[in-house]
Amino acid sequence: MSADKIDRHLMPERPANDRIKDFEEVAQGFSFEEAVAEAKRCIQCKNPKCVGGCPVEIDIPGFLKYLAAGDIEGAIKKIKEKNSLPAVCGRVCPQEDQCEKVCILGIKGKPVAIGALERFAADWERETKKLAGKPVSQLASEKIETGTRAYGHTGTRVAVVGSGPAGLTCAGDLARMGYKVTMFESLHLPGGVLSYGIPEFRLPKEIVKLEVEFVKSLGVELVCNALIGRTLTIEELFKQGYKAIFIGSGAGLPNQLGVPGENSQGVYFANEFLFRVNMMKAYKFPEYLTPVLMGKRVAVFGAGNVAMDAARCALRLGADKVSILYRRSRTEIPARQEEIIRAEEEGIEFTLLVAPTEIIADDKGRVKQVELLKMELGEPDASGRRRPVPVAGSEFKLDVDMVIVAIGNSPNPLIPKATPELKTEKWGGVIINNETATSIPGVFAGGDIVRGAATVISAMGDGKAAAKAIDNYLM
Ligand code: FAD
Ligand code: SF4
């Protein structure tokens, strides 16, 4: 049988009734044999569509060829030519909408499991180095081809604001080109959403930490607790000698439901809840001193990745019943398919075609119910998804003692507010041209601060494009 006729290998996962008891990782990764067999399914297309589907343009057939031959070191080096965060991307990127969506094998069967193989190569590198007592960042000191041109050490200073995937990618690429990069982060830890948003059971924080270490090992200086717009303005950064600035400050401003009762006790924004759980290790209370107020019957509004993460954390923290409440149908749910399935397996309930009209509190101000209105689907809206239309008179109430609001985030407003010359869209996104340049000469931007809440890999693609644009600007 030819390799491409072999069924796609499935990554093993912990059973649902085990995994809901802790925050350990759910997906377990391929074994060496599974990874090599899966890589062998790739038919090494002459015109590999998968590469075009990858926003950071990894040479996918190139790394799969190494893997198929059992050369994992070769594979990870090939990946790292373009991607400094492979263990992260292998876990959380929506490959099903990108490289795997356009993989030729997907036309008649199942695409190559590109994401799982990227994860395998990155995990192998980490574990092998750990076993050998070597720093995981060591690869950085080996020569990594940029694939474009040989860069001298220009030593020109560039500031990167934000250490999420956009900032990390931009900073890493600029450092490889020889720039002297300082990455400013407002929080006490780097990583952006990778650290404070996505939970441990999907993306272990140790992995984020090591991938940040890799970027630092490329020569990037990291300054935490530096809130740009307050600690230092964009103008002050220029005065300090930075010749160009990349803004990758993300979209951390939660959207509100806009219904009465939203300020009741027991109502959290997903970001705040997840921040406490992840960054402040609330799930390890009292070992860590941050408590999180938990309910037994939890309603989560929204159905994106953020909502799934919040719901699954609530379940692990001891809720008896967690419901995702979403105003459209199953087809329109924006979260990754595999995360929806995992949430269902874990016992999260999905109440579809409903929207909140009120959050009802008891006489002490604590949430006790939500009032919901049934919806039906109308014509498609601007997003192409069918618009939810209220069913008149269909209100009903649901007993809950905690509400998590996860209906999207908007760009962080601080830098635009502190920088009046920086042009923004009405909804807050920083305006850039085709080359990521903002309205201020020498200032570039990308990731969620430009797109609104999007994806890790699109933020990384923007960071990469901005590094090229900054290089052109400074040449
Ligand atoms: P961020 O990751 O938000 O990083 C911005 C950084 O800038 C932060 O560290 C912030 O503290 C810092 N910052 C902000 N303002 C300032 C300032 N003034 N000065 C200095 N620093 C500042 N995407 C996927 O592809 N797959 C997923 O499975 C997925 N799951 C998600 C789950 C959750 C819970 C959330 C919230 C998002 C998820 N996303 C997912 C979306 C993805 O994480 C984001 O699109 C991505 O992180 C955006 O990257 P970024 O670098 O633009 O911003
Ligand atoms: Fe391999 Fe699929 Fe890419 Fe072709 S499109 S090179 S089969 S991964």
Image (cartoon, helix red, strand yellow):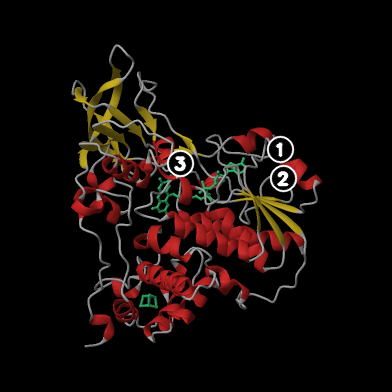
Q: Nearer the viewer, mark 2 or mark 3?
A: 3
Q: Amino acid at mark 2?
A: Ile
In three-dimensional space, the C-alpha distance between marks 2 and 3, rounded to whole angstroms, equals 36 Å
> Marks 1 and 2, how far apart in space?
7 Å
Near mark 1 (Cα within 10 A), the count class, few <14, some 14-19 or many ≥20, is: few
Circle nearer the N terminus (1, 2): 1
Q: Identify the residue position indicated by label 2 in the image.
A: 440
Q: Is residue 226 left or right of residue 82?
A: right
Q: Amino acid at mark 1?
A: Glu
Crowding at dot 3, Cα within 10 Å, few <14 / some 14-19 / many 20+, comes out as: some
In the picture, the disc for residue 246 is none
Q: Which sits in the foreground, 357 or 370?
A: 370
Q: Is residue 294 above or below residue 452?
A: above
Q: Is residue 40 visible?
A: yes
Q: Secondary structure at mark 2?
A: loop
Circle number at residue 421: 1
Q: Amino acid at mark 3?
A: Met
Of residue 152 and residue 273, the one placed in the foreground of this image is 273
User: How far across and how far down the image is residue 336, in percent?
Assistant: 32, 53
* Secondary structure under the numbered disc 1 in the rendered image: loop
Q: CA distance from mark 3 to mark 1?
A: 36 Å
Callout 1–callout 2 Cβ contact below 8 Å: yes
Residue 102 in picture, x, y percent from top left: 37, 68
Q: Does any portion of residue 352 appear in the rendered image?
A: no
Residue 280: mark in rendering:
3
Mark 2 vs mark 3: which is more N-terminal? 3
Q: Is mark 1 within 8 Å of ligand 1?
A: no
